[in-house]
Image: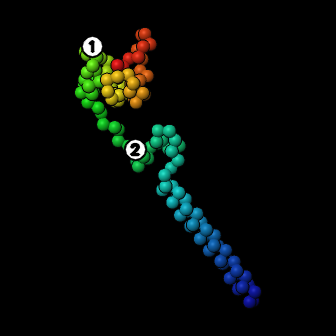
Amino acid sequence: MAQPLTRRRLLLPPPLLLLMLLLALAAHHQAAAASDPPVTHGGMRASGTRSLLQQQPPPPRLDCPKVCAGRCANSWRKEMCNDKCNVCCQRCNCVPPGTGQDTRHICPCYDTMTNPHNGKLKCP
């Protein structure tokens, strides 16, 4: 009868090892889930939802009339320049610094917006 007790003692540790392995895997899975999820373009997770930690507040809105007044300061048609600049500023929330065309590339949305009727650049 000594053999069945020995066998029983040998059989007892494997279920404990299995339980310990399952607990370790569960802890690893929980730690992996708590870390940053895989992110795709635009801060979206692969599942299509945003994490609360990844949401960034929107950038503050520009004071378009003030910024456009500076942008159009040297224009010979200030009123038309201000009107177009304000439309572009509202859509893009970006106005290039200065008064020249050499800084347009700083705001890609502003730089590429065109008039749908004639295809010319819309923003001054």
Residue situated furthest top in the rendering: 118
Looking at the rendered structure, the kind of residue marked 2 is Gln
The quadrant of the image that shows the C terminus is: top left
Q: Is residue 90 visible?
A: no
Residue 4 is situated, as x and y percent measured from the top left of the image, at 73, 84
Callout 1: SS: loop
Q: Mark 1 points at which residue?
A: 76
Residue found at x 41% / y 17%? 121
User: Is 33 on the left or on the right of 105, as rendered?
Assistant: right
* Residue drawn at point x = 73 percent, y = 82 percent: 7
Query: In screen coordinates, is 75 left or right of 22?
Result: left
The quadrant of the image that shows the N terminus is bottom right
Q: Which residue is drawn at 63% across and 70% down?
A: 18
Binning the other alpha carbons within 10 Å of mark 2 as few (below 14), some (14 to 19) or many (20 upward) gives few
- The reply to whether callout 2 and callout 1 are in contact (CB within 8 Å) is no
The residue under label 2 is 55
Q: Residue 52: horizontal and vertical position, in percent?
A: 40, 47
- Type of the residue with mark 1: Trp
Task: Name the disc covering residue 34, or none.
Answer: none
Relative side of 97 to 33, left or right: left
Q: How far apart are marks 2 and 1 (CA)?
A: 43 Å
* Residue at horizontal 70 percent and vertical 80 percent from the top: 10
Quadrant of residue 62 within the rendered picture: top left
Colouring = rainbow
Q: In which quarter of the image is residue 56?
A: top left
17 up-or-down from 110: above or below: below
* Dot in front, 2 or 1: 1
| Mark 2 vs 1, N-terminal side | 2
